[in-house]
Image (cartoon, rainbow, N blue to C red):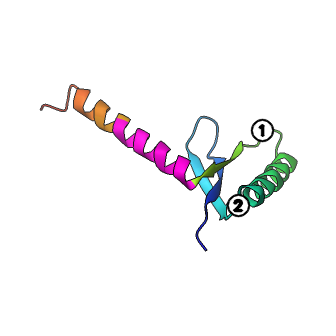
Amino acid sequence: MRSVFVIQQRDGPGRTWRTVTGASTHAAATSLAVELQHELDELSSRSPPVRVISTVELADEARVSSNVAEMLRRRSPWANR
């Protein structure tokens, strides 16, 4: 069965999100995320945040990121060299 929701963890302060696992329902994903955050908090007082995001939202984020990257490439002073 394909995951509909993914649990992601920040890859350090100010870094990108990294997918840890997935779940077929929001409730299951949220439960896993809460458990993961609790375990991370036990290991470190500065544990990275955890989030639950749907695969649709994740695809939207990827599309927006790709569009922004393309716009930046086009506006780059090195793009026309």
Q: Is residue 64 found left or right of 74 in the rendered image? A: right
Label 1 secondary element: loop
Rendered location of residue 14, percent (x, y) = 59, 34
In front of the other: 50 or 3: 3
Q: Tag on residue 25?
A: 2
Report which quarter residue 65 is drawn in: top left
Q: Where in the figure is residue 33, as x and y percent of width and height? A: 76, 53
Q: Is residue 50 above or below residue 69?
A: below
Query: Residue 34 location, x and y as percent?
Result: 81, 51
The boundaries of the magenta stretch are 55-67
Q: Which residue is mark 1?
A: 46
Element under disc 2: loop
**Quadrant in which the N terminus is drawn:** bottom right
Would residue 66 appear left or right of 76 to someone viewing this image?
A: right
Q: Residue at x 57, y 40 (%)?
A: 15
Point out the residue furthest to the left here.
81
Say what amino acid the circle numbered 2 marks: Thr
For image coordinates 84% across by 46% down, the residue present is: 41
Q: Quadrant of residue 3?
A: bottom right
Measure the alpha-carbon separation of dots 2 and 1.
28 Å
Above or below residue 68? Residue 22 is below
Is 27 positioned to the left or the right of 73 in the image? right
**Which residue of the protein is positioned furthest toward the bottom in this rendering?**
1
- N-terminal-most mark, 2 or 1: 2
* Image disc number at residue 54: none
